[in-house]
Image (cartoon, helix red, strand yellow):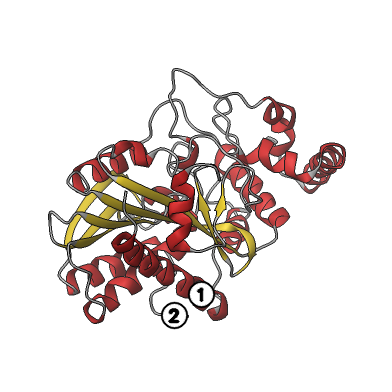
Amino acid sequence: MNGCFSENYAEAREKFLGAAREVGAAVNSFGLGVTGPDGGELATDVAWLGAAGASRVLATLSGVHGVEGFFGSATQIEWLRRAKALPLPKDTAVLHVHAVNPYGFAYLRRTNEENIDINRNWINFDELPENALYEELSADLCPADWSAETQAATGSRLNAWIGQHGFAAFQKAVSGGQWLHSQGLFYGGAAPSWSRKTLTHIIESKLGSAARVCIIDFHTGLGPYGYAEPIVGRPVSDPAFERTRAWIGAAAKSLYGDGSASAEIKGDSMSVLPRLLPHAVVDALALECGIRPINEVALALRADAWLHAHGDLNSPVAKPIKSMIRAAFHSDDPIWQGMALGQGLAACQAALAGMGIVSK
């Protein structure tokens, strides 16, 4: 295993803080007020390297989707470990935000302590989006029973729905976001989450004087094994999409109708974070690295939702479910880790170079 990857959240946090302090980064921590499975503190940690008033800043985010945090965490740790050998360009700084959703990272959940998907939480709660197709699927996606018989029956009905409507419609219906079923999948919550509020504070307070910002949000779970797809939360017709693609590369896909591994979603941070910095030119993208086939990922999410809504975390069935969801969003294979890490570091370096040549 690559030394920058970790077995769990506690190890990842220790490595991140150690690497940040070793290179002389300024560190801040924001405690969630909830303990992890080992009784330890859960927090979002921030490392700033570079001049305090730098006009160009690269910001990286890990662990927005908790259990997906291993990839982003490893990239942040390795970047910090190499920072002395890779001096920053003039008037440039880097902001690493580690474990945006520390609960999900620690408890191997994609969601937070309230079952909220942080990347469906960035909405105006006075105008809730609708997702009628999720309503059709809700009972089969998240049944109250998880016996073999129920899995077979619900799986059969879901496959029949896919046969009638197509897999693309199924993916959009399930993962696009929903705001009515608090124990369901891809639940966007009923109010801004702690993670959203904390990240908003970090972005606004740390990047208030920046004129040029690039944000990279690390994710896993979709796409081919070991390939990290750059996904931009802007339509292809938006000049900001072309500006982002100019530095990340021609493989970048728009979240909106561009053939991305991700369905079009609502409430994602990448589409909203630039609005927090109206004074700056902001490029934001998600780097999505695939691991397991999407049907296995979906089954792991359904099993984990059942476990936290109706099961017992201390029961014998909990361990295999947690192993299944960890395997859906992280791999201990050194080949996968090398592929993911290389692409993660390359994206960071591309952003640093791009900020120097792309003007408003």
Which element is circle 2 on? Answer: loop
For residue 278, above or below residue 106? above
As helix, strand or loop, the secondary structure at mark 1 comes to helix
Q: Nearer the viewer, residue 23 or 70?
A: 23
Residue under the point 15% across and 70% down: 24
Pointers 1 and 2 in contact (C-beta within 8 Å): yes
Residue 116 circle label: none
Q: Tell me what residue is drawn at x 54 percent, y 58 percent.
A: 252
Residue 144 relative to residue 64: left or right = right
Mark on residue 2?
A: 2
Q: In this view of the protein, can residue 142 be seen by the observer?
A: no
- Left-right relation of 250 to 342: right
Mark 1 residue crowding within 10 angstroms, few (<14) / some (14–19) / many (20+): many
Q: Looking at the picture, tell me which residue is in the foreground, 87 or 177.
A: 87
Question: In this figure, which residue is indicated by the disc labeled 1?
Answer: 337
Quarter-of-image position of residue 19: bottom left
Could you give the CA–CA distance between mark 1 and mark 2, rounded to whole angstroms?
7 Å
